[in-house]
Image: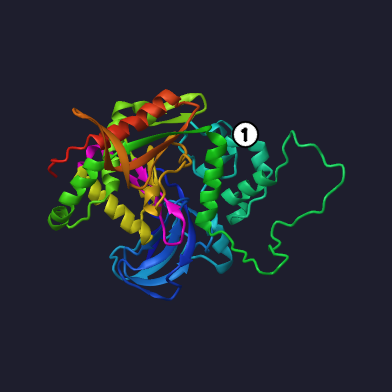
Amino acid sequence: MAQYELLLPKMGESVAEATVIKWIKQPGDKVELDDTILEIATDKVDSEVPSPVAGTLVRHLYREDEVVQVGSIIAIIDTEDIDEPTEVPFVNQIKEEDILELNAPAITEDLPTAQDSLESESSHRFYSPLVKNIANQENISLPELEGLKGTGADGRLTKDDLLSYISNKPSKDSPKPLVSEPTITANKPAYSVSGGDEVIEMDRMRRFIADHMVMSASTAPHVTSFVEADVTNLVLWRERVKVSFEKREGEKITFTPIFIEAVTKAIKDFPMINVSVNGTQIIKKRDINIGMAAALPSGNLIVPVIKNADQLNLVGLTKSVNDLAGRARNSKLKPDETQNGTFTLTNVGSFGNVMGTPIINQPQVAILAVGAIKKKPAVLETEFGDVIAIRHMMFLSLSYDHRVVDGALGGSFVRRVADYLENWDINREI
């Protein structure tokens, strides 16, 4: 039999590593082509790694909960399907006690980024891009990082190690207590005095969401502007076309792709809303990649991204929205499908809410929340004078980073989105 080296596949330009969640196949198991070998997780999404060959799984090279670099060998499969055996320079002669040596991540040179100030300092210890970004944001120097104990493979410093250090790090301005307080052990289980409370440990995704939200709130001064829009023409148009659209395209048309189309048009009118911040630099994005916040059955939140949304027509946007939303609910998203968003839309109206004040999805500078569409009495101006009529109304709320987006820009942008929705052509063909 030939031995095949299963590599951790490339999962997108911005994804450099993943964590092994669960091995589906164990050593000795038969493997068919495209069988799932293991489940992995990046910072934002879980994925499955299929086998490109058939054979028998021989060995795992990483344990569960260990971090793996893209391109690393993660398993060995015996197969008869390969005429020329793949050369395995170290696996064929490996001893059981040497497995940990294989688990050590390769020391690779990361591509420098504008955010990565640690790159200017040399270190023999590997730090993931996420750890470096957090360290830069918290002004943690390389010598300070070098002194931290890591719980990852071979003492590697993980994101959780760094966040734990930051949360327990005393502030420079904090006065020392006059009376020493009893030490609280971080791993001590929580309990309730009454015994009636339930303690629920956050899952991995919820911990990441929590860290990301706290980081965003501490990074960007949030301001929110509100606009109420009359979307009666839009609602009536959708009611007219939805049945024929579904018969023709095999897809249901929801309001989300319509909102995304309006957002992309407004971004073209106000391109400085489609930026990110790096220190004192404003990075104006060329592409318009719209993230759409989606609630998962677990209660967690994920944001799949429609790349180059401005280049899609309404049919293309509808297909993309339905595809990403469906695969998000079934945990089938690819890691790269949650990366590189430049603006985010969240539909709080799907929960019956009329408005919200969302937190910016860093490193973006703005996020739009659309509320529930409600029938309300409204004053209309006609050639015969003002009248009161029942109209379909909704609120739009834009949270933006006041470091680079002033009220004039933020308010004008959300107003322009509302204008596109209010001025919808009720006779539009699709």
Residue 27 at x, y = what percent? 45, 73
- Vertical order, 88 against 383 (above or below): below
At 21% from the left and 41% from the top, the residue drawn is: 233
Residue 409 at x, y = what percent? 40, 25
Q: Nearer the viewer, residue 57 or 423?
A: 423
Q: Amino acid at mark 1?
A: Asn
Extreme residue in the right direction:
179
Q: Is residue 215 left or right of residue 348?
A: right
- Vertical order, 189 against 362 (above or below): below
Q: Is residue 171 left or right of residue 315?
A: right
Q: Is residue 354 left or right of residue 53?
A: right
Q: Nearer the viewer, residue 56 or 427?
A: 427
Q: Nearer the viewer, residue 282 or 148?
A: 282
Residue range (magenta): 290-313
Label 1: state its secondary structure. loop
Corner quadrant of residue 54: bottom left
Callout count: 1
- Vertical order, 153 against 3 (above or below): above
Location of the N terminus by quadrant is bottom left
Residue 362 at x, y = what percent? 47, 39
At 50% from the left and 55% from the top, the residue drawn is: 205
Instruction: Tell me the crowding category of disc 1: few under 14, some 14 to 19, or many 20 or more residues within 10 angstroms, Cα based.
Output: few
Identify the coloring.
rainbow
At 31% from the left and 30% from the top, the residue drawn is: 416
Is residue 327 rendered magenta in the image? no
Q: Is residue 33 left or right of residue 13?
A: left
Does the image show residue 215?
A: yes
Residue 77 at x, y = what percent? 39, 68
Does the image show residue 131?
A: no
Q: Circle 1 sits on which residue?
A: 139
Location of the C terminus by quadrant is top left
